[in-house]
Structures are given as C-alpha cells and as structure tokens.
Image (tube, helix red, strand yellow):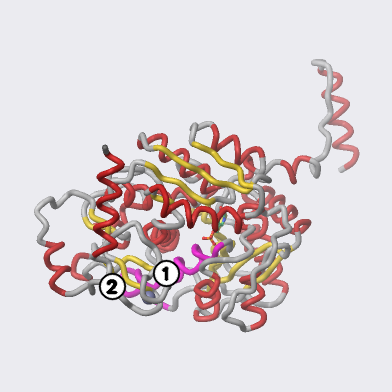
Amino acid sequence: MRRATIMTSLQTDSDINAIDHSAESTESRHRAPAADKLRPRALRCKLCGSGFEAAPTAVCENCLGPLEAIDADPATLPTRAEISRRPHSIWRYKEWLPFDGEPTLSLDTGYTPLVDAPGIARRLGVARCWIKNDSVSHPSLSFKDRVVATAINAARAFGLDTIGCASTGNLANSVAAQAARAGMDAWVFIPDSLERGKVAATQIFAPHLVRVRGNYNDVNRLCAIVADQFGWGIVNVNLRAYYGEGSKTIAFEIAEQLGWALPTAVVAPMAGGSLISKLQRGFREFSDAGLVSGTPPRLYGAQASGCSPIVQMVLDGRDDVRPVVPDTIARSIAIGNPADGRFAKAAITQTGGWAAAVSDADLIEGIKILAADTGIFTETAGGVTVAAALALAREGRFSANDEVVLCITGNGLKTLEPIVDTLPESPVIDAKLREVRALVNAVVNSA
Ligand SMILES: *Cc1c(COP(=O)(O)O)cnc(C)c1O
Ligand SMILES: [Zn+2]
C-alpha cells in the first residue's frame, strides 16, 4: 500500500521535472503553511543550470550532469551569535543544508573535536596544526555520519521507507546504524573484500547486507540501476544531491571552532572526491555570509598510490578522470572512477592547493605518527592523510606561518588487519611483582 503511494509520487515528480525553478515557485514554497515540516530544496544542474523540483533524483535529464540543491535565501541566514546558541550538531548550520523546515532524524551527529596537534605542526614545519577528529563521529565513527544524516532526512521527507548505499565500508556502517535508529529498512551493497571490522559494524544493525564480487566501481554501477528499480533512497546515488551537502559541515565546524577564523590550509582524504569539493563550498559559503573573513584555505587532497586518480589529475593538470583498478589497503577511499573527480581537482587548483599519493607502508607509518603525537587512532584513510601531509611538507608546499587542519575521517578500530601484524609482541607474565620488576629494569637498562 505504502510502496504504491511512493511509486506514484516518484512518477509524478519525474513528470514535472523539466520545469524551471522560477521566482514564483520559490515564493510559494516559502509561503507553505506547515512551517516546521522538513522540505528538501529544489535542485539545479551543476553543469547546464537547469532547475528541477525536489526529488530523489541526482542526474540532470537534459545533460546527465549532477544535480545539487539550491541555496537558502541569504536574508534567512543566521548570525554567529544565533548559531552559537544552538545545540552542537551539524544542524546548527541548517540554513546551509539542503532543506527548509526542521530535521526529524539523526539530530545529534556532528560537532566533532578540533584537536590541537603541536607535534604534527613541528613535523610539518608549520605554525599550528589541528586534527578535525571525525574518528569519533556519532553514531558510527566516521565522517560519513554527516552525509547520511542529511540523506536520511531527505528520504523521510520524500516518503521513502528504505535507504541504501554503495559503500567502501564506512558509509555501510552509517546507513545501517542510522536506518536502524529511524526504524527504516536498509539495503547495503559493499565489495566482497572489506575489512572484518567494517562488515561487523554494519551487520550488527541487521540491514540487508549484500557483498558484491568486484570492487567499488562494480558495486556503484549495480546500485545506480537498483535505485531506479525499487524506489529506494540510495544515499549516494539518487539522494546524492542531499547527501553531499552534509560534508560542508566539516568546514563550518572548523571555522567556528577556530573562533570564526579560517586556517590557511586543509588536508583531506579523497575517495569519490565529494568531501574536498564540499569543503571548498563550505568555506566559501561562510565567507559569503560574512561569518569569517580572509582568504579561503588552500585545499590539499590525499590518496593512496594504489588508487590515486584524482592526485594524478592534479599532477598532470588534467580535467578528465582516468579510471584505475584499486590496489591498496586503504579500502575506504579506494574508488577507481571518482564521481566528483573533476570537482575535487578544481577545488584543489582554485584554492592554490596540491595533492599527494602515499604508499601503503607510509600510510601505516602515518597511523602510528598520529597515534604517538595526538592519542588518536585512525583508520587507513587517516594514515593516508597524515602521510600525504608529511609528503607535501617535504615538497615545500607549506610555509612556517601556515595554520593547517588535517581531516581525520575514520576510526582505527575498524581496520585492524593491516596494523596488528606491525605491532610488537607484548610480554606475558605470571602475576608476580618480581616479574614486573624485571621488565621495568629491562626498560630502564635499555633507555
Ligand atoms: C568516504 C570517505 C572519505 C572521502 O570520501 P569522498 O568520496 O571523497 O567524499 C574519506 N575518508 C573516509 C574514511 C571515508 O570513508
Ligand atoms: Zn544539466
């Protein structure tokens, strides 16, 4: 019964898709009587500019370009003081998220710590360094909680009762967790070779988990068809316009946590390239709103050398993505054919940043350096970010007065496999004081 209603409403949406987003339709939306009900904003094509009604659709029917949600009316934007009084979550910046009205789900995601990291600053040879620590994101310990929080609200507003995703691991965890809490069904598609921690941290929420033989590219192509067939909200396929906006909240939080100021440089890992392009947009939106002043930060992209198509675009000065077959332990960012590669490369070059790819050995070293200097245990993607920052520093990309933020996007407990075998054996003793004393003496003598 419910499903039939959904299919009908989807059909209607696509029938009226071709209308332009006119001043008149903006006004009628603002006059809508149910002031509190969440209403996803209308969409516009990023390439040809065509306008469309809000719908679970992410592709322009005129040019096949990606759709994105239109901006809020600038007159409705809050001041610093107003934002400061709101609860600590991504929704404190709700005017910059792709909705009007009030969200109903996942209200407590966001506002992760910004951690001072003087040890990393010393290693980079810069004035200051902070870690934006999404390894402790709520509820599923990665930055994907932000994008799922916006997508699941769009799904609910569109009347969809099932969400899903094509995932390299963290998105699977977050979709399964947030769907469980919202009482929605989840269909989660992953490559068959993911880390055990990622699989378990999905299965615990009892979604329909499907392991697909192949890499992320195969999973993603399958999900593009699936989204059309079953009327589901696949968060990073047909809900992508609403999903992607959640990433901007990292930029908003960094600016607010620095006391309404901008860092000079930000280093972020790249998979599909969405996060880094949304960081550019987030910093720009806060500047445009007059909440921060000064030059937007230079954006630096990090990938593993076993899957670095976006880094290659930057190094070659190319705008076309040349797909690769991933071969790296950094599985969460192993996307060989990045959907937003072009926008990621533009964000990097337009801000005056650069990009670096690092080996699997270097990323493991990066995980250990971050742990030693900051007490944060990150996953492989975080190791890529730290190692890439160090590589960029060696290339002379930073200067002594730079203030750098590293985006640490995932938690190390989920990717134990590549780490455990590199750690030392710990001694096993009987519960006897003299055995402890012998160990302490051995440590003292070797120091
Ligand atoms: C998904 C992901 C990213 C980057 O994703 P984009 O597709 O580039 O937005 C970065 N780090 C981790 C840990 C991720 O799971
Ligand atoms: Zn278009």
Q: Is mark 2 within 8 Å of ligand 2?
A: no
How many neighbours does mark 2 have within 10 angstroms: few (below 14), some (14-19), or many (20 or more)?
A: many
State the extent of the magenta-drawn residues as a range. Answer: 272-294
Residue at 35% x, 37% y is: 182
Residue 423 coordinates in the image, percent (x, y): 79, 41
Residue 413 coordinates in the image, percent (x, y): 63, 40
Quadrant of the drawing holding the C terminus:
top right
Q: Which mark is residue 66?
A: 1
Amino acid at circle 2: Gly
Counting the numbered discs, the total is 2
Q: Is residue 171 left or right of residue 334?
A: left
When the figure is inspected, residue 94 is found, relative to residue 204, above or below; the finding is below
Where on the picture, by quarter, is residue 249?
A: bottom left
Amino acid at circle 1: Pro
Q: Nearer the viewer, residue 288 or 123?
A: 288
Element class at badge 1? loop
Residue underneath mark 2: 51
